[in-house]
Image (spheres, grey):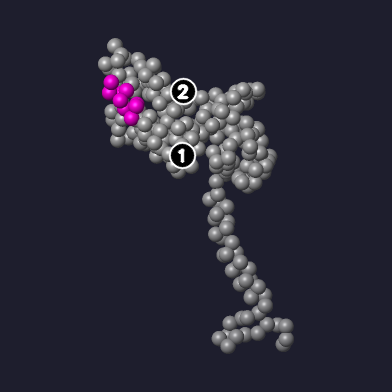
Amino acid sequence: MAGTGSTTTDGSDASPSKAKKTTRAGGTSKSKPAASRRRNRPGPRQRLLGSATHLFTTEGIRVIGIDRILRDADVAKASLYSLFGSKDNLVVAYIEELDKDWRERWEKMCEDRPKPEDRILAFFDMCIAEQPGENFRGSHFQNAASEYPRPDTDSEHRIRAAALEHRRWCRDTMADLLTEKFGYASRTLADQLMVFLDGGIAGAKMNRTVTPLETARELAKQMLYTAPMMYSI
């Protein structure tokens, strides 16, 4: 009878209802990869930090608005404010994440460098290695601090403080390594090394070549081998 379905030549049921179920089942199987991608997708905090890092390091901090970050991260504004409270707090978190990553990569580079002088030179080697890949944008910490030369609010002070904390860690780490090498406190030498490093980074940014950083490294190396004759214990 018409409308009650039919059988195929091999005797299987080919009713419209069965065909619809098959189609729906097929549609479900196709959606599994998309569902899997959603499950493996980073959470809102990671996406916000990832987008902020990309946009701030390539274009600057002040020029990037909240809406641009939200679009790039595909995160609702309510999530940003619940996670960070404000754009300035997101900037602080971005700088702190950069600092954490920098320290971890420096420690990784130093795994096969037992001598303190080689660990000091690793600061220069890291910059030499990373600047071409970052399009010679210079130090992201220096860049962040320079965008807030005269901080007016508490959050702006915290942004500068986060950037300066990275520099303090570099200087103090160099000072500790110098003390390990020479056997006496070497804060002055650490300050000189930081001048070499700062100048090398600034020169590489301006000239778009690692040559200034290589020169700074050579100056640091010479100082490391002549310092005992220049300074008494």
Magenta residues span: 218-226
Labelled disc at residue 168: 2
User: Outermost residue toward the top?
Assistant: 233
The question of residue 221 being in magenta is answered with: yes
Q: Position of residue 154 (x, y in %)?
A: 63, 23
Q: Nearer the viewer, residue 116 or 209?
A: 209
| Badge 1: residue crowd in 10 Å (few <14, some 14–19, many ≥20) | some
Q: Position of residue 138 (x, y in %)?
A: 48, 35
Residue 13 placement, left or right of 122: right
**Label 1 SS:** loop
Q: Main secondary structure of the magenta part?
A: helix
Residue at (36, 21) in percent of width and height:
176
Nearer the observer: mark 1 or 2; the answer is 1
Q: Is residue 49 visible?
A: no
Above or below residue 66? Residue 2 is: below
Q: Quadrant of residue 120?
A: top left
Label 1 – label 2 distance at C-alpha: 26 Å
Residue 108 placement, left or right of 76: left
Q: Nearer the viewer, residue 86 or 178?
A: 178
The question of residue 130 being in magenta is answered with: no
Pointer 1: what residue? Answer: 208
Q: Nearer the viewer, residue 187 or 82?
A: 187
Above or below residue 119? Residue 15 is: below
Q: Nearer the viewer, residue 141 or 2?
A: 141
Q: Quadrant of the N terminus?
A: bottom right
